[in-house]
Image: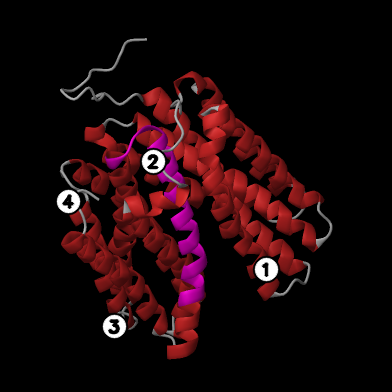
Amino acid sequence: MSQPTLDANGHPEEIHWPSLFAAISAISAVGIAIGLGLPLLSIILEKRGISSTLIGLNSAMAGIAAMAAAPITTKLAHRFGVAPTMLWAVVVSAVSALGFYYAPAFWMWFPLRVVFHGGITTLFILSEFWINAAAPPRRRGLVLGIYATVLSVGFAIGPLIFSAIGSEGILPFLVGAAAILVAAIPIYIARDESPVLDEKPQRHFLRYIFLVPTATVAVFVFGAVEAGGLSLFPIYASRSGFSEAQAALLLTVMGFGNMACQIPIGIYSDKLRDRRPLLTAMAVTGLIGALAIPFLVENWLLMAVVLFFWGGCVSGLYTVGLAHLGSRLTGSDLAAANAAFVFCYAIGTVAGPQGIGAAIDLTGNDGFAWALAFFFALYVAVSIGRFVFGPKHS
């Protein structure tokens, strides 16, 4: 195989598509399974008469599993290799996905959730590390923009499949398990091209959270806004006078904004020497958009336009934050930092729904917008503090 062209610093300038295709297609197949599985499991539990509180508690196992799996993923990859660890994660995730169908007691779903989302988290961490390691530095934003776009498409296809096949019988579980197993094919084909972790990370896992705070706080805010916003926006919209169909369509528009904006944002980030100002600008846009939401409830069309671009900026925090991480670290440090990145995302997915829900209860319906604004303001404050007091390179 011919070697890629190198720049003056010894970095590859060409995009090595086979390796990137393996990581991107693998995690996209998993995205389809998650998009199918999340509504499927909730609907089945509701049909069994499980209370909403217990369903929410069971769903929260996803974030807990992610936080538990993140610190050990790099150690597993260092010991067994990146591709073998990903292949085992595929098998574990697929078997546990099918296990939900055969688990008669509700309590069994708690360890199954932990195993399933632990495997999924491992795939996310190592896929993103693989993509970051293989992407040419000058085109990292483009590559990660493609990754984020394809992953968003996978998440969108999952609910579409669910609406077509329903929740009855074993078929939806078989489809979900099969989608995960498909991810093993590109991983296996490109197994010899997966990055090698010859050395252990130089720092303790938790140190990586604070090593590149402009990336890890960005993904925390993204996780909080995504999980909290998506789960509670239908409630906010219905209390504001929108119908269920109108609220669902607004979420769809926001999802389209997410898919449409990631590649342009990624390409633009490649033109910057430092991506931190772009991250701050997107957080400021998110802050302004969140504060504007209460003033848009009288005009559905205007809200749809704002949410389209707002959704793109919010998701850009993840894409550009990941690119910023890859531009600062390499090798085992990048793998460990990727684990810390996903760990912070998991914390956000737990904190977001709790914080936004509490804000609505305490301050009324507009508490939804104020809580979203708080998360964005938090990132802006961190960015300013990092600029004033931090080192030149974060």
Query: What residue is disc 4 on?
Result: 392
Could you tell me the amino acid type at mark 4?
Answer: Lys
Q: State the residue at coordinates (32%, 10%).
A: 2
* Dot in front, 4 or 2: 4
Could you tell me the amino acid type at mark 1?
Answer: Ile
Point out the tag, 2 or 1, that comes first from the N-terminus: 1
Mark 1 and mark 4: Cα distance apart in space: 46 Å
* Dot in front, 3 or 1: 1
Q: Are marks 4 and 2 in contact (CB under 8 Å)?
A: no
Point out the tag, 3 or 1, that comes first from the N-terminus: 1
Q: Farthest residue toward the top?
A: 1
Query: Predominant secondary structure in magenta?
Result: helix
Q: Are marks 2 and 3 in contact (CB under 8 Å)?
A: no
Mark 2 and mark 1: Cα distance apart in space: 31 Å
Residue 343 magenta-highlighted = yes
Left or right of 115 on screen, residue 120:
left
* Dot in front, 2 or 3: 2
Could you tell me the amino acid type at mark 3?
Answer: Phe
Q: Around disc 2, counting alpha carbons within 10 Å, would you say few (fewer than 14), some (14 to 19), or many (20 or more)?
A: many
* Dot in front, 3 or 4: 4
Residue 134 higher or lower than 387, as above or below? above
User: 36 and 190: which one is in front?
Assistant: 190
Residue 143's disc is: none
Q: Which residues are magenta?
A: 328-355
Mark 3 and mark 4: Cα distance apart in space: 39 Å
Q: Secondary structure at mark 2?
A: helix
Point out the tag, 4 or 2, that comes first from the N-terminus: 2
Query: What residue is disc 3 on?
Result: 295
Q: Farthest residue toward the right?
A: 104
Could you tell me the amino acid type at mark 2?
Answer: Tyr
Query: What residue is disc 1 on?
Result: 55
